[in-house]
Image (cartoon, helix red, strand yellow):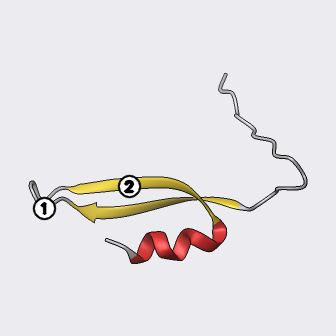
Amino acid sequence: MAKKAVATFKAGTLKKMVKCIRMDKSPKTGAYVFTEELLEEDKAKDFFAKK
């Protein structure tokens, strides 16, 4: 049976977090590499804008 991890945060510092996954092409091999980060919702656009 699988277990589900649940994270709890303090009510005073609650910020919406999103998991961002970006697919990049490796310059060495040409294969695709997946980059994952857990960020605040307002910083997600910056994550996808940079290469």
Q: Tell me if mark 1 has few (under 14), some (14-19) or many (20+) residues whose alpha carbon lies within 10 angstroms of its own.
A: few
Q: Which residue is mark 1?
A: 27
Expressed as whole percent of the image width and height from the top left, the position of residue 13 reads 82, 56
Expressed as whole percent of the image width and height from the top left, the position of residue 33 reads 28, 54
> Where on the picture, by quarter, is residue 18?
bottom right
Q: Residue at x 70, y 34 (%)?
A: 5
Q: Which residue is mark 2?
A: 35
Q: Is residue 27 left or right of residue 40?
A: left
Residue at mark 2 to residue at mark 1: CA–CA distance: 15 Å
Q: Residue at x 37, y 73 (%)?
A: 50
Q: Amino acid at mark 2?
A: Thr
Mark 2: secondary structure: strand
Expressed as whole percent of the image width and height from the top left, the position of residue 26 reads 18, 59
> Where on the picture, by quarter, is residue 22?
bottom left
> Where on the picture, by quarter, is residue 16?
bottom right
Q: Is residue 42 above or below residue 26?
A: below
Q: Is residue 26 left or right of residue 15?
A: left
Q: Is residue 31 above or below residue 7?
A: below
Q: Is residue 33 left or right of residue 20?
A: left
Q: Residue at x 69, y 27 (%)?
A: 3
Expressed as whole percent of the image width and height from the top left, the position of residue 48 reads 44, 72
Q: Is residue 49 left or right of residue 40?
A: left
Instruction: Point out which mark residue 10 bears.
Output: none
Farthest residue toward the left? 28
Q: Residue at x 67, y 22 (%)?
A: 1
Mark 2 touches mark 1? (CB < 8 Å): no
Which quarter of the rendered picture does the C terminus lie within? Answer: bottom left
Q: Tell me if mark 2 has few (under 14), some (14-19) or many (20+) residues whose alpha carbon lies within 10 angstroms of its own.
A: few
Q: Amino acid at mark 1?
A: Pro
Mark 1: secondary structure: loop
Count of marks placed on residues: 2
Farthest residue toward the right? 11
